[in-house]
Image (tube, helix red, strand yellow):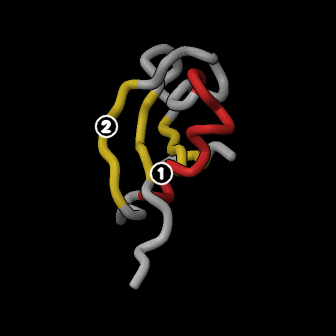
């Protein structure tokens, strides 16, 4: 049984944007994994896991 992607949830300390990255994107983003897609600053880690109930509040970085 699979639960889908493991997601990492963040918010930006600069603009407040909430965003999420799928774990399988780590190789693609490298050291920029977890960075705000708007401000290009490291996001503040909130949580990780399968898709959360409040997932629609987060922008999915692809």
Vertical side of 41 occupied by 46: above or below:
below
Residue at the image point whose x is 47% and y is 51% from the top: 57
Q: Residue furthest left?
A: 47
| Residue 50 picture location, percent across and down | 38, 63
Q: Earlier in the sequence, mark 1 or mark 2?
A: 2
SS of the residue under disc 2: strand
Residue 19 coordinates in the image, percent (x, y): 52, 40
Quarter occupied by the N terminus? bottom left
CA gap, disc 1 and disc 2: 13 Å
For the image, the number of numbered tags is 2
| Label pair 1/2, CB-CB below 8 angstroms | no
User: Where 35 falls versus 5 (above or below)?
Assistant: above
Q: Is residue 27 left or right of residue 13?
A: right
Q: Residues within 10 Å of mark 1 (few under 14, many from 20)?
A: few
Left or right for 14, reference 50 = right
Q: Is residue 46 above or below residue 30?
A: below
Specify the label residue 33 is tagged with. none
Residue 25 drawn at (x, y percent): 61, 45
* Residue at x-position 51% and y-position 30%: 34
Residue of label 2: 46
State the residue at coordinates (56%, 39%).
26
Rendered image quadrant of residue 38: top right
- Decide: is 11 above or below 62: above
* Residue 49 location, quadrant: bottom left
Q: Which mark is residue 57?
A: 1
Q: Residues within 10 Å of mark 2 (few under 14, many from 20)?
A: few
Q: Secondary structure at mark 1?
A: helix
The residue closer to the viewer here, 49 or 17, is 49
Q: Position of residue 60 (x, y in %)?
A: 60, 49
Residue 2, by quadrant, is bottom left
Q: Is residue 61 left or right of residue 57?
A: right
Mark in the foreground, 1 or 2: 2
């Amino acid at each position: 049984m699979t639960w889908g992607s493991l997601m990492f949830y963040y918010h930006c300390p600069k603009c407040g944007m909430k965003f999420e990255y799928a774990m399988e994107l780590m190789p693609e983003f490298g050291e920029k994994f977890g960075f705000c897609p708007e401000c290009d600053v490291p996001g503040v880690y909130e949580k990780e896991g399968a898709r959360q109930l409040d997932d629609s509040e987060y922008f999915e970085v692809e």
